[in-house]
Amino acid sequence: QDSTTASSRIKRVAKLRDEDIPMAQTEKLQKALKAAASAPRDAVSLVTISSQRKEGKNVRDLVQKKREMFLVQMALDVKKAEILKLDEKARRKEDALKRSQQMIDEDFTRFNNFLEANDDKAHKAMRIAEEKTRARQDKQKMIAYIKTKINHVQSDIAKQKEHGDEAIKYRAFLDRLTPQEFKTRMAEQKRARKANRRKAWIEARVAEQTAQMHQEIRDMEAEVTDGLEQLRRRLPKKKYEEEVEARREEVEKRSLAIRKRYPNVDQIASRYADESSGDEGEMYFQEPWQLMEIFTQLEEQNLFLIQNGQDIEQSLEEVEN
């Protein structure tokens, strides 16, 4: 870096213009340079004259030469100062350029990072959009499939309802044709089934309440009698027996209170809510010939009624005549 700086300084010194130095200093510098160029020759001549004539040099000429040398030295100092200023200025510009280049590099790196992050976000957003699009299409397909299934189920329900309405009409018709004795027997069986359901429900509730009550009593007895074995070893026999008796009375008292909290059979039975099992029992008509037999009986009854009506009409006509 020092060699580069020195060479650059030499180049900059070589390229200095006369305008960079004030006019008065330029003139002084030119005079000093001319004087410096002729100084060796004058010195040789002075030595020769001094050696030949053995005379001292003129004081005035010596002062003039020193003055010229001083001016030359001053011009060189001015040039050196200008060179140092230009070098400092160039160094500051180089530092500024380096900082600018560093800032540009950092901005470029940040920009590249931003572009990469933006690309990643864009790709991620595209993937999410594609996934959501596929999910929406799947949902739409599922919705269409479910709607089709619903339409089929509704169609089946409508058909079954029509069949059910027809079956209800036919059953009502057959119920009107069913003999009264069979209807009475079916009603008694239905009442028996209802009574059995009520009995089974009450028994189940009673068993449940009883088991819960007995468990609570056992837990209470264990709590009250806890520690009696240790007391038997520590207390005298009489005091131990008194303690046992006191705890037994407490157990009986608390057991009675627990039993009172649970409902009895009548209270449980009052909570029963009858619900129909949906079983209407078997139908009277199990075979086609049964229906034909009923139709035949009805037909015979109708014929009898018709014949009886005709006989009555004939009797009335005879009475009128």
Image: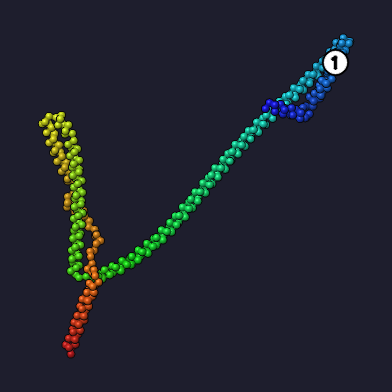
Q: Is residue 179 above or below residue 279?
A: below
Can residue 266 be seen here? The reply is yes
Left or right of residue 220, residue 7 in this image: right
Most extreme residue toward the bottom, as rendered? 321
**Which residue is at 15% across, 29% downward?**
234
Q: Position of residue 16 (x, y in %)?
A: 76, 29
Residue ID for mark 1:
44
**Which residue is at 22% across, 74% downward?**
293
Picture quadrant of residue 273: bottom left
Most extreme residue toward the left, as rendered? 238
Can residue 20 be seen here? The reply is no
Instruction: For the C terminus, give its image quadrant.
Output: bottom left
Q: Position of residue 129 (x, y in %)?
A: 50, 50
Element under label 1? helix
Colouring rule applied to residues: rainbow
Left or right of residue 148, residue 61 in this image: right
**Which residue is at 14% across, 41% downward?**
252
Most extreme residue toward the right, as rendered? 53
Q: Position of residue 310 (x, y in %)?
A: 20, 84
Q: Is residue 98 above or below residue 57?
A: below
**Which residue is at 53% across, 44% downward?**
120
Q: Position of residue 308 (x, y in %)?
A: 18, 82
Q: Amino acid at mark 1?
A: Val
Circle 1 packing at 10 Å, graded few (<14), some (14-19), many (20+), is few
Q: Is residue 158 above or below residue 59?
A: below
Instruction: For the N terminus, give its image quadrant.
Output: top right
Left or right of residue 244, residue 138 in this image: right
